[in-house]
Amino acid sequence: MSDEQKSKDRSVLYVSAGIALVFVAFSIILPSQMAKAANGVLAFLTTNFGWLYLMSVFIFTVVIFIIALSRFGNIKLGADDEKPEFTTFQWFTMLFGGGMGIGMVFWAIAEPMTHYMSPPVGQPGTPQAMHDAMRIVFNDFGFHVWIIYAVCGLALAYFQYRKGLPCLISSAFYPILGDRIYGPIGKTIDIIAVFATIFGVATSLGLGAAQIATGIQYIWGITATPGMTAVIIAIMTAIFTLATVSGLHKAMQAVADVKVWLSIGFMVFIFLFGGMVFILNTFTHTFGDYIQNFMGQSLWMGNIEWTKAWPIFYRAWYIAWAAFVGQFIARVSRGRTIREFILASVFLPAGFCLIWIAIYGGAAFNLDALSHGAIQAAVKTDISTALFATLQHLPLYVITAPLAIVLIIASFAGAANSATYVLSMFTSGGDQNPSKKLCGFWGIAQGAITIMLVLVGGTAAIKTLQTASIAAAFPFMLIMLVMCYSIYKALREEKV
């Protein structure tokens, strides 16, 4: 198939858009039935295949580090004589930036406090429950996340920059399918990747908007209605869509800079005033426990219902994000060796995430004890207020609370901009410069899906989005397992 034919082929776009449209239509016309069906799918997948989500990520872990430490680690992601496009410092900065997502802002306090109050095993409210809660969150936001992204990123970078294939997920299967990647099988793979990305991003958009709405209510007393949440989603959608369509690289760099500096500023501020010694003690103990129990907790299913609600959901959510985050880390890593790519893209962002959680979670536990359970009470009332309840017990709340809302918006805008670009690329035959119309379509589509569901079903509709992301991640997880074999098969043919 010629390049011109590929560029004119819009089947992935039409089918992907059609699936999204059908999902939204049914959610609007039959909201309760759709929610019931979504919950049925969730129950079926997590009950019967929950083990496979955990086992798959374990397999990704083994495969990715075997490749990194083998002779294949010396292979360039590009031509043999190609130099990295970015300096080491720039590369590290972008990888660090990739670790700062909206999920980190939302859950860094809310999740450890939740597990502290309702642990999967043991008694709640004890020092042991606190350390277990922090270890659990390390497990959910630590190395596993970036191992998932590294698998997809390695496939995209290798076949895109080393083999000159289109910037599509299906390209990773060329060693198995050959030119059939341009046919129905390859297009099905790309459609699944697009579908998973749409609902993975929509879930984060819904969570972020809900956190902003409840934050506004918490700070200024303005009721957080579904209508307000929809308006916030519309504003966030307009920001990242206009940035993507207009190609305002300087503007997007400004957003990224705001996110980075605000994130660092909040970390330093919370560390200094949230109890430095307590945070350092908690981090030291928890990190050691996390490393010591890494293998066991990766596959732990001692409490099935709890495992389905937390580790399995997180694995599915990250798999849903793998296509576009993988493309991001692939793009900034061109010219690096496979070993450099894997070790840096796993350990640098994961390390940043662990420090973030240690500071936010540790400070929350310290301030909760000093305030006699005030943060626990806030989380019980509304989990979205966890960050604001913590900031309220620190100095300069009148300044930090509004800045927290800015941080949430900036954190999502950067990720959504990348997702919109990658969706446009995946639905235009792998074109690295997709049209502005296509970028605009996917930007608006992501926001519209979330707004319509929230208006019809309220904030409870976000649960439907979460369920959809898990459902979409299941077939993509199977694709990623086959992808591991395809990568290995291609690497064996390299002369190293």
Image (cartoon, rainbow, N blue to C red):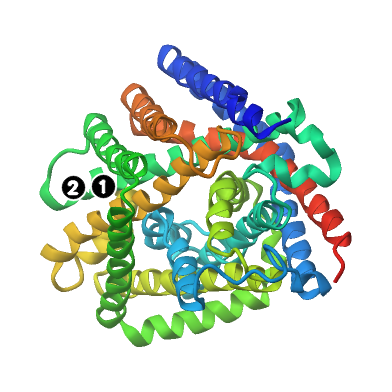
Rate crowding at label 2 as few (under 14), some (14 to 19) or many (20 or more) other CA atoms within 10 Å. Answer: many
Q: Quadrant of residue 45?
A: top right
Residue 121 in view, yes or no: no
Question: Would you say the residues marked 2 and 1 are in contact, meaning their CB atoms lie under 8 Å apart?
Answer: yes
At 62% from the left and 67% from the top, the residue drawn is 335
Q: In this rendering, is residue 250 above or below 43?
A: below
Q: Position of residue 250 (x, y in %)?
A: 29, 57
Eyeballing the image, is 288 above or below 304?
below
Q: Residue 434, image x and y in percent?
A: 48, 38
Amino acid at the residue labelled 1? Ile
Q: Nearer the viewer, residue 440 or 80?
A: 80
Q: Which residue is the extreme one toward the top?
A: 29
Badge 1: few (under 14), some or many (20 or more) residues near its Cα, within 10 Å? many
Q: Is residue 13 above or below residue 156?
A: above
As helix, strand or loop, the secondary structure at mark 1 comes to helix
Does residue 49 appear to the left or right of 435 in the view shown? right
Q: Residue at x 23, y 33 (%)?
A: 231
Which of the 4 image quadrants contains residue 46?
A: top right
**Residue type indicated by callout 2:** Ile
User: Percent position (x, y) of residue 9?
Assistant: 62, 25
- Residue that appears at 67% across and 58% down: 154
Q: Residue furthest bottom?
A: 277
Q: Residue at x 83, y 60 (%)?
A: 491
Tell me: 342 left or right of 481.
left
Viewer-proximal residue, 412 or 45? Answer: 412
Compute the Cα span from label 2 to label 1. Answer: 6 Å
Identify residue for label 1: 212
- The image's mark for residue 216 is 2
